[in-house]
Image (spheres, coloured by chain):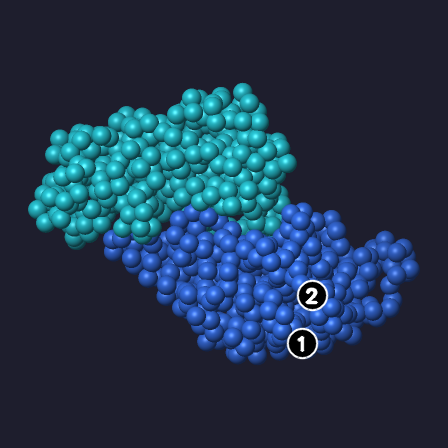
Chain colours: A blue, B cyan
Amino acid sequence: MKTRYFDHVATNPLLPAALDAMMPYLKEEFGNPLSVYDLGLRAKNAIEDARDMVASLINAKSAEIIFTASGAEANNMAIKGVATAKQGEGKHIIISKVEHHSVLNTARSLEKAGFAVTYLPVDKYGFFDLDALKKSISKETILISLIHASSEIGTIEPIKEAVAIAKERNITIHTDAVASTGNIPIDVKDLGVDMLSMSAHQFYGPKGAGALYLRQGQRLVPLIYGGIQENGRRAGTENVPAIVGMGKAAEVAKAELQQRNAHTGRLRDRIINALKDVEKVHLTGHPTQRLLHHASFVVEYIEGEGMLLMLQAKGIYAASGSACTSKALKASPTLTAINVSPTMAHGSIVFSLGIDNADEDIELLLEEFPQIIKRLRDISPFRKGWGEEEGGSKHV
Amino acid sequence: MKTRYFDHVATNPLLPAALDAMMPYLKEEFGNPLSVYDLGLRAKNAIEDARDMVASLINAKSAEIIFTASGAEANNMAIKGVATAKQGEGKHIIISKVEHHSVLNTARSLEKAGFAVTYLPVDKYGFFDLDALKKSISKETILISLIHASSEIGTIEPIKEAVAIAKERNITIHTDAVASTGNIPIDVKDLGVDMLSMSAHQFYGPKGAGALYLRQGQRLVPLIYGGIQENGRRAGTENVPAIVGMGKAAEVAKAELQQRNAHTGRLRDRIINALKDVEKVHLTGHPTQRLLHHASFVVEYIEGEGMLLMLQAKGIYAASGSACTSKALKASPTLTAINVSPTMAHGSIVFSLGIDNADEDIELLLEEFPQIIKRLRDISPFRKGWGEEEGGSKHV
């Protein structure tokens, strides 16, 4: 059976051009970049070329890119690194209620270490409450970390406005741009952030490669100590093939961004326009100020896992922010933050699009999905249970 | 020119069987292991198969293996993870003076955070002073972290004896076994350690994959917070291809260990036996209780970098623990700890052997290297400078 992959926020297939670029470094060019002989120097040069390409994708200087093994590592490094470096100046941090777990749980670990954390509320679209941001800043505030775009609801946040507020008070600001970097245009100079996290596999690069943009002059304590790799800011033998693949993927993403966005944006709009007419299916996140490859919904009366498994039976892969599928046994904090009830959050579904999706994929989805909803509702215990009590309101 | 690679402690070529195992996960099997559909489940299963293979290599249970991106990450995770988890019980840590930078610099970061660190001395072979270990333990001691085998001097340490001392006092003990795992037999149950760090590229696995063995029941705070990967102990989308490659490399290492050791041990002894007769060339580390693929020396009157570059001109790749080549501008702490003078430490050279080395490689090395030593000494400013003051004594 031909499969249709609509889960590009979970991960992406590796771009063939990126794999081609990696292959020599998985074979004969295996040198350690710290070695002084030519085999090592070629590996070192390959990393520096990749650094240039990643920097160029976000309009940073090459020296401002620190390679990591994942977006999660970049987020941990940014938040713990600044918290440790600046704890003498204050112990208050601000994040939002719609952060990824790698930001949320890092902030919680800092709470255990004696930091105070403010969890900024959002509106029904997921937009930060910027007034609340202003009010929550105190003399103790040393760091603000806010997501750039949510992989769960797609909303692109007003980071520039948040940066203006942070800079007025001279507070370091980080953004988790893992879901957005390589998928929409990002210019760190224009955004004005001090730090930005990204992940290669979100833009068709390899797994095992991420990066932190660290503005020149910004202090940071390392997360991983050891050798002098990454200018002493992140130790461990460099994953040369993955870094090279990330560089190539960044280069291609920059060149093809407009064309990719036109393609996925059109497919996204087909999904949103068709599903908004299905009874008791609600778009989550903002209708237009959202990632171009992202269409997310809550479907009343049924559960995410059931939808995913029935879609899979038709060769369609998608994601859910629901409790079962995240395996965390709790309602998604992001959906809770935008005021989706815990019951309705069970029916979360996310279709995220990619360069490998064609119009016929969308047609199949739009033919199958409403039937799946109907079949699941026919057997749903929620239909005449919790659903009757809580459902029905177009509350998102 | 045919090249001869004698720098297997820096990194190794990737085993073709490991690359073959990785290829599907670099191509069509690109799923996220957290996804509920079949593409994700196959990735998840591949990780669990790899976990079994890595566990089997060191006689651990699969649930005791936490995948990381590097040995450095595993070392940081172990030391900071236990220090944070147990700081309520005491704030004293013991490491040795011959640790890798990823242990040494992590310990130093804990000193800045208010921990006391004892740096255990070693004898001229690099063996821990076990009496000093006993004496340095106090009621405040919560963690002992000692290297299993040094990549700089090759010495295999008496870890079992150190474990016995630690266990008598009920203190958690970690070993950095990055240089040894996959290269000599390791049985964590026999060693008795609570934690052990390893790195895939040290045994012909891919870069970007490491692991921490964490004995069941041992408490640890995560280094990287976020999602529920690795049972909530290490967040970030799994680097599936690298993990799969690590598993395959572990499986092959286990099967071929004896044969590999017989081969590299014989080549190592050829090097040691020939070079010990060269004037003012001294073996570092223990003559026999050492890694089978490891031959290390200090060469009086000349510098490591000069040797490496002249060796490279003959197609021979080796390493040096000297200041220039480590780019750290300081004498190697390991060589200092075994009482090599800073001047003589400049002349450090390490030949580390692998499955790709043949007898003819050794013959070339043994023909070229003494000539290189002679030529460099002829032009050495040290010969009639510092060297005269400090050199000459067979002090190692």
Above/below status of A186 relative to B116: below
- Quadrant including the C terminus of chain B: top left
Residue B60 can be seen, yes or no: no
Q: Residue at x 34, y 54 (%)?
A: A33
Where is mark 1, residue-wise?
A289
Q: Position of residue B280 (x, y in %)?
A: 15, 35
Q: Position of residue A221 (x, y in %)?
A: 51, 54
- Chain bearing tag 1 is A
Q: Residue at x 34, y 37 (%)?
A: B334
Where is mark 2, residue-wise?
A137
Q: CA distance from mark 1 to mark 2?
A: 26 Å
Above/below status of A67 relative to A112: below
User: Which sits in the foreground, B194 or A389?
Assistant: B194
Of labels 1 and 2, the one closer to you: 2
In this rendering, position of residue B268 left or right of residue A337 = left
Kind of residue sitting beneath label 1: Gln
Q: Earlier in the sequence, mark 1 or mark 2?
A: 2
- Chain bearing tag 2 is A
Name the quadrant containing residue B287: top left
User: Which sits in the foreground, B321 or B318?
Assistant: B321
Q: Are marks 1 and 2 on the same chain?
A: yes
Do tag 1 and tag 2 residues touch (Cβ < 8 Å)? no
Q: Position of residue B196 (x, y in %)?
A: 48, 35
